[in-house]
Amino acid sequence: MAGIIQFLEKAGNGLNRFMVIMACVAVMGAVAAVWWLIGAVGDSSLSVGPDDAIDSTPTIVERMQNIGEWEFLAVSDEEIVDTVRKGFFSDDELVRIYYGTLRLGIDLRECSDKWISHRNDTVFVTVPQVKLLDYNFIDEARTRPFFETGTWTPADRKAMYHKARRIMIERCMNRENIAVAQNNAREQIARMLQPIAAPKVVTVLSAAEAE
């Protein structure tokens, strides 16, 4: 710092002390800005070495995996579930309405150690298969009886709850919804990583596609 001030005092040819101090402040500000920029780029960059192996900085990997579960599609469903208990004189029947929202997505903590790779001008990002993120998706506060005759125990109602959940999973975790969630995952992850990987092109694959 003393060298900078001495240089400015010699080159100033009569500049007053105020101008010298302002020039020093400007130089220090420029140096600080450069260091900040280097740090920002260093924390969010992907580099490719001579062996065509992509080096994902620990910061990127850690931040992405810390996202954990990432939802890409939410499917709301309503199911009417009934059960009948045969009796000697009459049958008992219980009908209930269940509501639920199934969240389809991926868990980035399940990524393999080599989930980011490089070939030619493309960065390949391999993510886990889409799955149901939460099995407790039925909104029990909205569950209500529709028709009921006879006496039913808490165990009977619990069995109906599991039946409703199984029906919802079979209906909503179909091939079409899984494909939609998988496509959403590809688009959103690629959009997030593309500015970092540029000018390389980011291609996102599911674990099954990468095999």
Image (cartoon, helix red, strand yellow):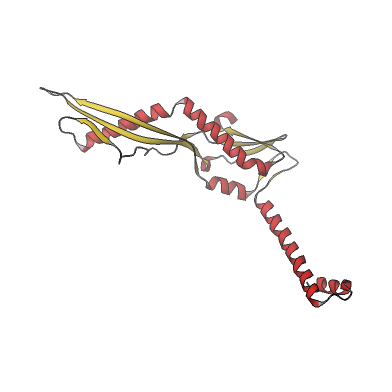
Quadrant containing the N terminus in the rendered view:
bottom right
Work out which quarter of the rendered image holds the C terminus and state it: top right
Q: Which residue shows up at 47% across the image and 34% down it?
A: 131
Q: Position of residue 163 (x, y in %)?
A: 31, 30
Work out whether residue 211 can be spotted. no
Instruction: Give the residue displayed 72% in from the left and 35% down from the top.
Output: 121
Identity of the residue furthest to the left in this view: 89
- Which quadrant holds residue 75? top left
Horizontal side of 11 relative to 59 (left or right) equals right
Left or right side of 167 for 184:
right
Image spot of residue 127 (x, y percent): 56, 37
Q: Position of residue 66 (x, y in %)?
A: 53, 48
Residue 150 drawn above or below residue 191: above
Disc tally is: 0
Q: Quadrant of residue 74?
A: top left
Residue 164 occupies quadrant? top left
Image check: 166 left or right of 1?
Answer: left
Residue at the spot 26% in from the left edge and 32% down from the top edge: 96
Of residue 50 and residue 203, the one placed in the foreground of this image is 203
Q: Confirm whether residue 96 shows in the render.
A: yes
Instruction: Tell me residue 56's x, y (percent).
Output: 65, 45
